Each structure stands twice: as structure tokens, then as C-alpha cells.
Image (cartoon, grey):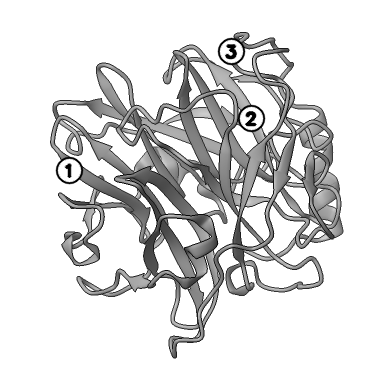
Amino acid sequence: MKFLSLAWVVAAAAASAGSSSSVAPRASIPNKFSWTSTGPLISAKSDGRGIRGIKDPSVVHYGGKYHVFASTVQDAGSSLVYLSFTDWAQAQHATFHYLDGKGRGYRAAPQVLYMASQQLWYLIYHDGLAAYSTNPDISDPAGWTAPKHFYNSVPASVKKTLGDGAWVDMWVICDDANCHLFSTGDDGYLYRAQTSITDFPRGMGEPVVALKDSKFALFEASNVYNIGGSYLLIVEAAGSFDGYRYFRSWTSESLSGQWKTLASTEQNPFAGHTNVKFSGAAWTMSFSHGEAVRTNVDQTMTIKPCGIEYLYQGVDPREHGDYNNAAWKLALLTQVGGCGSN
């Protein structure tokens, strides 16, 4: 993946403006968002590993600490890193634990969650397939199991539509009966598969298309959250302004139901350069692959509609080139105003 050409971003803008019609969501979820952003809080360390950037964060606040999992950007390919700290001001000083001890190879885009019925932490990620590891103790970086897979190969329904895309960015969320695996293809398709909570992680069915748009308007990095019984979907898109990334959003009453547009344009995004303010000069124009800070850490992925904090990856706007080799850094968005109103 590379930063985008003019033709790409023009197509993205047209697709975003012309996608599915807007339908008012439940009052508990606002349809307009505003944010303030910190400067970079976590960046690559000079520790001899040749890492240029940190990206794709997953974060929970548990046991009095923030626990952050992320992808690393380096010549040898992407791997995973874990760090924990009690305050965001300490984040860059926290020890980086590189999770490459049990089977080496490409791994990226982690999501951490606690499966309450199993009393196990799960780390969901992609390594060419949809992978996961488990650990009884989130704070023990050596406790993660070697990778296992939901499927032995790329499912036929995904292969059919991938084209020149890639099957990436897996996300698990469970309702009362089932666990749902969302994923994207860098091709305008959002996929969803499911298995029962009692069978999870086994028995994941054939993925179906949950949402479809143009390649650039529905690109990657999907998140799905439970907010007051409704569901909020966030997907990264490529914008019309130099291809800078931003987040679109949708709502649904069911994880297997129809997704209705919420804040889903570049002018009215979930988060993007049009609705994020900085205390000083803007250090980035890209608001890319991130995740809400969760204090409810279980498989329901429940967050509140107000005061959302969202950890995202950004990059210096003067840097152009290969997306996967950019010097991504992590910063924190804080939602301001607009809560509980439409």
C-alpha cells in the first residue's frame, strides 16, 4: 500500500459523497463528532531493531494500566509490540516488548480482548491469514501462545472479490449468542463471519459481505463497538486531499444487520482533518488505523457514546512514499461536545 495518486483520491471523494443514504441513528450515538488531538505519544525507539514506525494500535485500560499492542514498521516486515504504563505521559518511556518469540514472521494489526467465558485474553491479528494467540495474563508478554488460525486458507468468498487487494485487519466482537469476525480486503468490501460463543474460536463460518463501497471509500482498519445496544462501525477511507486517511462510520441494531451511514463523508467524518483540532500546529493530516480506549475489556467491545478516547496512527504530512515503511506514530483523540444529540 502506498500514499495515493490524484486519480485515486478523486475517485475516493466521489465514492464517499455518493455512497449509501444517511439514516438517523439512535439518540445515544451522535451523528457529528469533534475531537482534540495530542501530539505523538508513542514512536519507534532507537534500540537496534531498525524500526521506523509504530502503527495499528489496540488499547485497553485494565488493572490500573494502559495496555497497548501495535504493529512495527521495519525492513524485515511487520511484527507486534506490547507496552504498558499508568499515564500517557509515560508511554514513550515504557519498555517495548516485541512479540516475536514464538514463531517468527509477518504479523500486523492486533486487536486485544478478554473472552470472559474462557478467562483468556485473545490477540487477533493477520499474518497472511486470520490469526489469534491467547494468554491468561495480559501483562505477561511471554505468555502468548504461538499463532493459530480461524481458517486454513483465505476463504473462497473472500478470494472471489479480492482482486489485487489483501485480506487484512481482522476484528472480533460478540453479542449474546455469537462471535463475529469482521475483516477487509483493501478493495471496498467489508466481510463478516460468525461462530457461536460456545464454539469460539472454532467453527467460524464462510464470510459474507457486510458492506460494499468503492475501493477507496471503504478501505481497511474496521472497528465495531457496542454503544447502548446499538453498534458503531468505523472504517478507514482515503480522502480527496492528498490521499490523507480519515474514518467513516455507520450504525446498526444488529451485528448481522444492515449498516446505516452515520458520520461518513470527508466533510463530516467520524475523525479526519476537518474535525480534529490540535493545541499547536497540526503534526499530521492523516488519521489512520486506530482503536477506542476500552475500560470494558470483554468480547462485547462496549464503549460509551460520550468522551470517547481514540488512539490512532499519524504521520508527518511532508513524508511521502511507501505506506508500510512510513514513520507512523501514535497519538490520542479525545471527543469533545455533541454527545447524546443529533
> In front of the other: label 2 or label 3?
3
Tell me, yes or no, if residue 167 can be seen here. no
How far is the residue under mark 1 from the one under mark 2? 30 Å
Tell me, yes or no, if residue 243 can be seen here. yes
- Disc 2 residue type? Ser
- Disc 3 residue type? Ser
Q: Residue at x 72, y 43 (%)?
A: 36
Is residue 9 or residue 65 the one in the foreground?
A: 65
Q: Is residue 21 left or right of residue 127?
A: right
Reading the image, the residue beneath label 2 is 249
Q: Secondary structure at mark 2?
A: strand
The quadrant where residue 235 appears: top right
Q: Is residue 194 left or right of residue 111?
A: left
| Mark toward the start of the polypeptide (1 vs 2) | 1
Above-or-below relation of 288 to 203: below
- Mark seen at residue 28: 3
**Crowd tier of the residue under label 1, counting other residues whose Cα lies within 10 Å: few below 14, some 14–19, many 20 or above:** some
